[in-house]
Amino acid sequence: MKLLRRKEGPSLDDRLTALLEAARLAEGRLPQELVAQAREVSERAGERRSLSVDHTVAALAGATGSGKSSLFNALAGRDLAAVGVTRPTTSTAQAALWDGEGAGALLTWLDVPHRHEVEAEGDLPGLVLLDLPDHDSIELTHRLEVDRLVELVDLLVWVVDPQKYADAALHERYLRPLSRHSEVMVVVLNQIDRLSATQAERCLADLRRLLEEDGLAGVPVLGASARTGKGLPELRGLLEERVSRRRSWAERLSADVSTAAARLSGAGDEAVSAGTPDGARLTRALSEAAGVPLVVDAVAKAHTHRAVAATGWPMTRWMRRFRPDPLRRLGIASGTRGEIVGRTSVPPPSAVQKARMETAIRDVGEAAARDLPEPWAAAVRHAARSHDDDLAGALDRVVATKSAGAARRPRWWALIGGLQWMVFAATVLGAVWLSVLFVLTYLRLPDPPLPTVVEVPWPTVLLIGGAVAGVLIALLSRIAAWAGGRRRARKVAKALREGVDEVGGRLVLGPVSEELDRYRSFTEALGVARS
């Protein structure tokens, strides 16, 4: 079926799709009633378009005693509806069909069981005229039937009388909410035969004023009398014009889309610029809560500790075994090859650190939600805290994985360690050599030949030189280890900051950004739906 298109802007199809998308995006953000109404409009539009578009369904609606049933009979040319004066007589809607072939499915959808074929006159073929129950009936079922059909018909003809045309119930319950339906609405002031010409003009002018206050300026207002036939040709001509255009169904659907979009936009759809969250502050707060400063300090100390154990003087390095390794104490790099086993033992954040983290997360939500309408602002603030339960575990994994490289042993440790053992061997050799010479002297045996270095015996050179060299190498290695520890700590600190920043972006800034994107998409969809 080829859809009617507006001269400018998106097609009705595009607007309905946009409305449905806006309703989807508003799910859980805006009141469920508004979302359900928007979806109902889309579903109803799809059903109406699938039925006969060659027929125009016009409904005569009005209050008790307004004479709409008399008007219905006058337009049909015969008595089809029972006429009452002070009590409601129409309990269910009934239809008069001008060439109603093919309108059966449409009337079934409307749930109008009483149908009357009338003789087609002029350009009315295709008209389906409904006589509705009274909207102010004392019977609840009558009012509910009116409410149901008012939402479904293509063209609304409101029949009022001189006594109740200003009735607040009519204007507040029906006309004002249908302010966007002026193109598919007609108002008939019936029973003008009871008024003088001056009174009739005054009533019509006042009625137009009230309609303008309802947002329905430009709606056709006709004076008529079902009893005398006055104004009926004009009403019939207006119906003929609407029926011949075959556009009322599309105009009604278009107005329904505009109304539903306006209701959604009532919760706020201004394309405002969101604030910029302080990501750096968030990263700092998360880093403190994750114990990053403690870990960085432990990396530097652990590097020095392990370097001394690997390159220190063999006679003293064994004492390092009695000192705890700073990283192992935190449960970092505790596997056999430096891999992470379970969770770390980094202390949980203190009350101050936790408060700073919560404040930083809250400020992210507040900054992003600035100037947004409250339903969406609340959703943005909630998004900032939507992964609070996952933060602790994610930060701990970052600390564990990004600190794993701190366990790697530099190659120069092995070289220096080997050199230390060579020096230690030389020292031991010198000590043994001197011990042998001491024993020989003690036993008064002949002294063996003794090589010297500038008159210093080699055993003494080996003993003293080895001890001095070992201590000196250990001191130099410790200095190098301290520098290497600082360098490694800076590297780990950078990796940890990047990891914490990624966690903050994924669990805090990411959800906030997604919510803001959702709001922008919502405003764009509403813009199309209202076009």
Image (cartoon, helix red, strand yellow):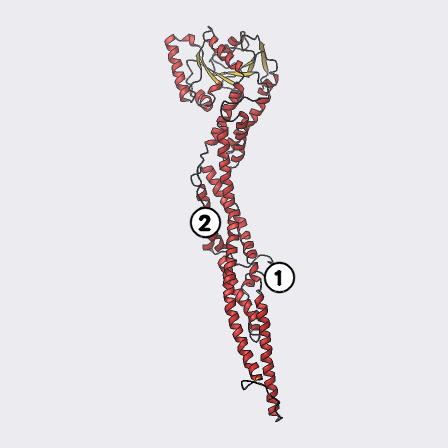
Q: Earlier in the sequence, mark 2 or mark 1?
A: 1
Nearer to us of marks 2 and 1 is 1
Q: Considering the image in quadrants, where does the N terminus appear? A: top right
Disc 2 residue crowd, few under 14, some 14–19, many 20+, Cα 10 Å: many
Say which of 13 and 390 sits in front: 13
Q: Would you say residue 371 is visible in this rendering?
A: yes
Q: Can you say whether 420 is above or below 81 in the image?
A: below
Q: Position of residue 206 (x, y in %)?
A: 38, 16
Reading the image, the residue beneath label 1 is 337
Vertical relation: 335 (above or below) 174: below
Q: Camera-side residue: 210 or 501?
A: 501
Locate residue 176 relative to residue 123 in the image: left or right: left
Q: Is residue 136 left or right of residue 444?
A: left
Give the SS element for disc 1: loop
In the depicted structure, whether residue 164 falls above or below residue 40: above
Mark 1 residue crowding within 10 angstroms, few (<14) / some (14–19) / many (20+): few
**Residue 360: image tag:** 2
Identify the residue shown where x is 52% and y is 55%.
Answer: 496
User: Residue 382's x, y, as percent?
Assistant: 49, 43
Which kind of residue does numbered mark 2 sit on?
Ala
> Residue 417, located in which quarter of the rendered image?
bottom right
Q: CA distance from mark 2 to mark 1?
A: 37 Å
Q: Tell which of 15 and 20 is nearer to you.
A: 15
Seen from the viewer's position, the closer of residues 498 and 68 is 498
Q: Secondary structure at mark 2?
A: helix
For badge 1, the amino acid type reads Arg
Q: Residue 163: percent from the left, percent from the top? A: 41, 14
Q: Is residue 375 above or below residue 429?
A: above
